[in-house]
Image (cartoon, rainbow, N blue to C red):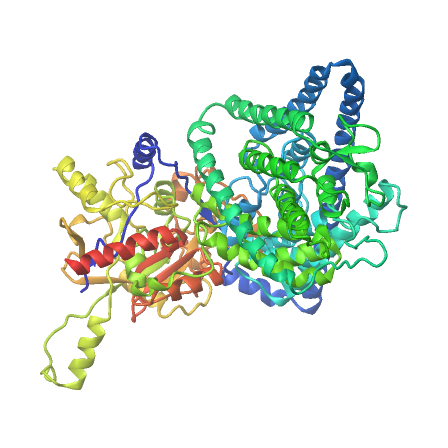
Amino acid sequence: MASINDIDRKDYQEMGMEMKKTLHSQQKKELPRKDYESLDYDVCYNHPFSEMMKSKETMPLVHQNLMRWIVTFIIGVLTGLVAVFIDFFVRHLTNWKFSVIETSIKHCTPAGCLIITLLIMLLFNVGFTMIASALTIIEPVAAGSGIPEIKCYLNGIKVPHVVRLKTLISKAVGVLFSVAGGLFVGKEGPMIHSGAIIGAGVPQFQSIAFRRIKFNFPYFRTDRDKRDFVSGGAAAGVAAAFGAPIGGVLFSLEEGSSFWNQSLTWRTFFCSMSATFTLNFFLSGITGYGWGTFNQPGLINFGIFQCNKKGGEKCDLWNIQDLLIFIVMGFVGGLLGAWFNALNKDLTKHRILHVNSKSKIVRLLEAVLVALGTTCIAFFCPIYLGTCKKLPQVTHSLNETKNYFCSEGEYNDMATLFFNSQEGAIKQLFHLDGAFSLTSLGIFFTCFYFLACWTYGASVPSGLFVPCLLCGASYGRFVGELLRSYANYDHTYHGTFALIGAASFLGGVVRMTISLTVILIESTNEISYGLPIMITLMVAKWSGDLFNEGLYDIHIKLKSIPLLEWSAPLEMYKLKAQHIMESCLSYLYPHTRVHSIIGILKTTAHNAFPVVTVDKALPLTPKDYDYPGNPISSNEEYARSKTMSFVLSEQRVRSATQEDPHEGEDLGQVESTVRLLPRQPQRHDCTDRYSSNSSIHSASAPSESFMKHARPRHNFNFGGIEEEASNSMDIDEHSEDSHHNQITSSSVNVTADMSTSGEQQLITLHGIILRSQLVTLLKKKIFYLEAEGSSSQPQVNFSGMTEDYPRFPDIYTIPLSRRDREKIVDVTPYMNPCPYVVFPWTPVPLVFNLFRTMGLRHLPVVNNKGQLVGIITRANLTHEYMEQCLENLENSHEH
């Protein structure tokens, strides 16, 4: 019999203790934490699923695959249309605003009434920003770029409202007003979120907003299918934003999905191409290039990179000696990105503690303050700090230069950057042959750097890609002009330095490599830039990683989302599964009474329950061959030493601690024994959650006389489950005398579950059943009378089990009579009889790889006899929790 030390198991409190901890954390200025559920990416191979697969012949499978491709195409087309909608209105709102402002500047510059121009500009920007912020107040998850949330969703985390139709409307409409409002944000990041929402919603053919409209579409009713479509939608968003379908596929692969296969790659690429050409077709026609000409591949166009030197002058896009300069620029860009992330991290912490925790109007006022500051800086810098330059004789985009506050034939270099759209300013830095002054570039970079850092995280839909590209392009152009002025280094195209600067700064902020390289190559339409961009991004990532993580990962951690990284740290090999598992469990029996299931569902927050039977261990009596050195006894001793068993019943601990006559003293002892770690999702303390009048313990089993003739209706072979159900279900689960629980100051020793006769009991795992499955069974009244036997239990097929997906009913909404509550549910046909399992001595990195790669939600831990000893969930595998467990383990070894 093995004891389970408290360093091997850390239980978290919920409900009442959660409120105390939240108040305590706020007093210490710690970030509040929130519980997140996991998604079910694993396939449940139960009886309805098996029957569904058997019924599918060749033609139905072909029909389903055809529907999968049709839905993928629809997702791509709709994503492209959303991009067209955003670009069309952003273009018109921006042109309207700048045309009014330009008219006012031309009128007020000689008249000396520029204050009127400033007020007009403030009216536009503040008004548009208020609309964008109001939409995020309606749906808070629409704020920001949405990429961290989609990354978490593809990782297997259910972020509330992240793929709702209301979120899509708030995001798509809000981003066009935030961009048109002059904020230093981009529309490309929200496009990725919008595509993911479309990918999640289209396969369901239903929405909460239109819950009365229902289609008979029985396909793709699992989280696994939805995840694949969300991957395609996110890739389509990247493709529509940058005109980079291959980059979109690589983005979903690098930043999103934890699971990938060949068929998903092909469908995702098809979705990206559909989005790209849909956007290209409509934008080409709308912008006057002609319908069907396909001249607008994405929302952002970097233009054509080519030298325009006079005859005889040497000009290259880049050469081999430039690589050293690019490496240095990448290193500096990584440092700038790391500082950007550090500043934004501190600012986001302040927002969470002092802005988001206040009323909604405070968030709106903060967004207005950002708009006021941005507008004033963008207005006064060109007036007082801009430099007038002569217009170059040859230019790619002469019409986008601004001659505000300058003479005829000149342009204001800083006004050209501030009074253009961000995409237009990027093209000026890439291709404008006239030199920008070093002073103007330095001032613009400094202002844009801090304003973009201030803006990202405010309560408006905001992308990060384009602001980082523009900020980095100004930094790169500054380096290029510096080399040209002081080193006579003018044989390399000036736009190349701007491109490398943009890549280095964006890579230093987001820490993307493969996908970002391909996105920039596809956006520039210049394959020769592949090598310098790749080297620059690699160096920028390495230098930035010396100080902190990418900005998306930082925001994920600030929100306390339990994202699983690509792999566990190497030092975690010191930990085994028994050190991180939860061994205080709630479980069910194969045949369980309805009232017991209702009680467990109402009094726990677990989303899955092990289905077990109780084994009576044979007494270890001395035998004739039990003498030292005998191989048989040695083998038995080894088996006993490796057999960890006896899980701690959550219901029994709850009853034992709540019904003790010295309740206050013992409860305090329990609370002092279980040392709490920082709050993680779905951590449940076994001793302090429910009132003392709770009569629900482990799921009560039917009587022994009944179980002698009760058999599962379907012929399953679950390793003797029928025999165990009939022979061991007569255990009185309400007997407190049968449970011996010793709690000391250093450990929680679970000696054994004892029956009334004093025999040891162990529980054998036979499968796992989800909360949603139990609720569906109760809703459809899948149970039977004890006198009639399990053969009278009704059946439900796979479609019936998944018809309520993704929003299954709550247990409190299911009406059940008193007669129904006394009936029995045979859960064996509906549980997953073959879940993935690990042994208690399995190294944690192996557990981590299995859990993440297979997209699991629950991972049982069993001993070498198939007996359940614990369960591992996502919260047990977060780096924060594993590091704390490792620290506790090392401390225990020291003592």
Horizontal and vertical percent position of residue 123: 68, 19
Image coords of residue 62 (percent x, y): 71, 65
Residue 768: x %, y % from top left: 41, 58
Horizontal relation, residue 858 to residue 744: left or right:
right
**Residue 646 placement, left or right of 825:** left
Q: Quadrant of the C terminus?
A: bottom left
Left or right: residue 336 versus residue 461 is left
Residue 282 vs residue 816, the one in the foreground: 282
- Identified at 18% across, 61% down, the residue is 893
| Residue pictured at 34% horizontal, 46% vertical | 683
Quarter of the view holding residue 655: top left
Quarter holding residue 224: bottom right
Residue 390 falls left or right of residue 265: right
Vertical placement of 814 versus 181: above or below? below
What is the number of callouts on the image?
0
Most foreground residue, 308 or 419:
308
Q: Quadrant of the N terminus?
A: bottom left
- Whether residue 213 is visible here, answered yes or no, is yes
Residue positioned 49% across, 52% down in the render = 544
Query: Residue 681, how many percent across, how many down?
Result: 39, 45
Q: Residue at x 78, y 25 (%)?
A: 102
- Vertical comparison of 427 with 266: above or below: above
Q: Residue 148 or 610: which is nearer the viewer?
A: 148
- In the image, 192 versus 68, the foreground residue is 192
